[in-house]
Image: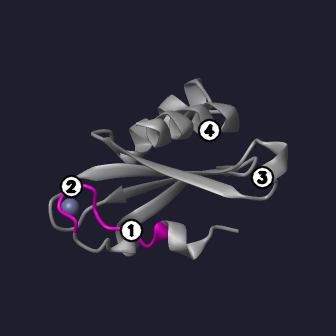
Amino acid sequence: MLDKTLLQTKCPVCRREKQWRQSKIIVGQNGLFVVYHKCAFCSSASLMIVSKSARAEEEGRLVAMEVLTDLEPQEVQSSLEKAPLKADDILDIYQETQEK
Ligand SMILES: [Zn+2]
């Protein structure tokens, strides 16, 4: 269900092609995916958050955003377990990013 084009991005820091074998899917439920990626070149860690659009008129569309993190995958996992992200939250963040 993940659109491959969403994932063919470059490292946000060093702009090199990502090595996806270094990635880890942390959450895969309710149409929400969080993919952890650590750059093989500069060691920057980022989270790719992919979610189904919550807007009815865009039913079935996927939205994706990426944020840099300094957490390890296990830490991301446990913070998500404490305060689960909802698709709506992701969409808000995504729309804010688009407006800038
Ligand atoms: Zn990099």
* Residue linked to disc 3: 58
* Residue linked to disc 1: 9
Calculate the distance from the C-alpha at mark 2 to the C-alpha at mark 1. 11 Å
* Image quarter (top left, top right, bottom left or bottom right) of the N terminus: bottom right
- On the image, the x and y values in percent for residue 19 come to 32, 74
Magenta part of the chain: 7-15
Q: Residues within 10 Å of mark 4 (few under 14, many from 20)?
A: many
* Residue linked to disc 4: 91
- On the image, the x and y values in percent for residue 68 come to 32, 44
Instruction: Tell which circle, 1 or 4, labels the residue nearer the N-terminal end.
Output: 1
- SS of the residue at dot 3? helix
Please determine whether, in this image, residue 43 is positioned above or below residue 2: above
- On the image, the x and y values in percent for residue 82 come to 57, 24
Q: Residue at x 68, y 38 (%)?
A: 87
Q: Residue at x 42, y 43 (%)?
A: 74
Q: Give the colour scheme shown.
A: one colour
Label 2 lies in ligand 1 vicinity (Cβ under 8 Å): yes
Calculate the distance from the C-alpha at mark 4 to the C-alpha at mark 3. 12 Å
Q: Nearer the viewer, residue 26 or 10?
A: 10
